[in-house]
Amino acid sequence: MENSVRWSLTVSKETDISLRIFLAQQGMRKGDFSKFVEDAVRWRVMDKTVAEVKKQNANVPAAELEAAIDDAVKAVRAGRPA
């Protein structure tokens, strides 16, 4: 990994053993441990972000949300080369 940083993590013994067993069963090696943790963190951040956005937009009418999404998609597509 380029531009990586080193983390010191503390987890329960059960979590450590469960993860190592899982990785071994998947044929993964020691270096895959970091990749697994990074992937898990990215998914969790995304999950929390989506939950927060849903909470913020809970009272917005569906048609208004759809229109905003459509506008955003059109803007992104307009900025991309064909």
Image (spheres, helix red, strand yellow):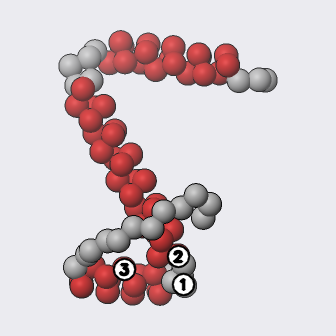
Q: What is the x, y in percent for residue 18? A: 32, 83
Residue that sits furthest to the right in the current view: 82
Q: Which mark is residue 32?
A: 2
Q: What is the x, y in percent for residue 26? A: 50, 81
User: What secondary structure is found at the residue carrying circle 3?
Assistant: helix
- Mark 1 is surrounded, within 10 Å at the Cα level, by few (under 14), some (14 to 19) or many (20 or more) other residues, namely few
Residue type at mark 1 is Arg
Relative to 73, 81 lies left or right: right
Task: Indicate the quadrant containing the N terminus: top left, top right, bottom left or bottom right.
Answer: bottom right
The reply to whether callout 2 and callout 3 are in contact (CB within 8 Å) is no
Q: How far apart are marks 3 and 1 (CA)?
A: 12 Å
In the image, residue 1 above or below residue 22: above
Relative to 54, 82 lies left or right: right
Q: How many labels does the image show?
A: 3
User: Which residue is painted at 47% across and 87% down in the image?
Assistant: 24
- Judging depth in this view, the residue of 14 and 61 nearest the camera is 14
Q: What is the x, y in percent for residue 14? A: 24, 83
Residue that badge 1 annotates: 29
User: Which residue is painted at 32% across and 86% down in the image?
Assistant: 17
Residue that badge 3 annotates: 19
Q: Distance between the residues labelled 2 and 3?
A: 11 Å
Q: How far apart are marks 2 and 1 (CA)?
A: 5 Å
Q: Residue 49 carries which label?
A: none
* Residue 77 in which image quadrant: top right
- Mark 3 is surrounded, within 10 Å at the Cα level, by few (under 14), some (14 to 19) or many (20 or more) other residues, namely some
